[in-house]
Image (tube, rainbow, N blue to C red):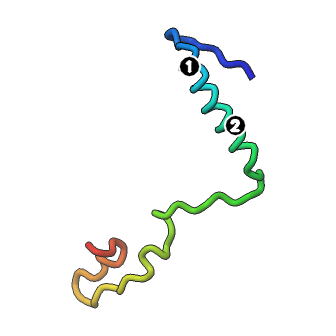
Amino acid sequence: MTIKVVRGNPTPEELAAALAVVRVRAAAASAVPSGAPTPRDSWSDPSRIAGRLLPQPGPTAWSRTYWPGA
């Protein structure tokens, strides 16, 4: 792996810090098995709205079924 500084003049400490971050990220990426499922984001988890009560029937109930709390 070759890393090249394109702009600026980093100090040896800045360059060492940047390389440490790159090495840690590479090690973390190689530690994850390729076939492992990725964790689900919490915003797309349907259980976050499943615990709420459905809106009461009425003329505007259809609009509140998709946007809970609206």
Identify residue for label 2: 26
The residue type indicated by label 2 comes to Ala
> Residue at horizontal 77%, vertical 52%?
33
Q: How many marks?
A: 2
Circle 2 sits in a helix, a strand or a loop, which is it? Answer: helix
Identify residue for label 1: 13
For residue 4, above or below residue 32: above
Q: Earlier in the sequence, mark 1 or mark 2?
A: 1
- In the image, taking residue 4 as reference, residue 8 lies left or right, namely left
Task: Please name whichever residue, 43 or 55, is drawn nearer the observer in this view of the structure.
Answer: 43
Disc 1 residue crowd, few under 14, some 14–19, many 20+, Cα 10 Å? few
Task: Please name whichever residue, 60 or 25, is drawn nearer the observer in this view of the structure.
Answer: 25
Disc 2 residue crowd, few under 14, some 14–19, many 20+, Cα 10 Å? few
In three-dimensional space, the C-alpha distance between marks 1 and 2, rounded to whole angstroms, equals: 20 Å
Where residue 59 sits in the image (x, y, percent)? 22, 84
Where residue 5 sits in the image (x, y, percent)? 59, 13
In this view, the residue farthest toward the bottom is 57
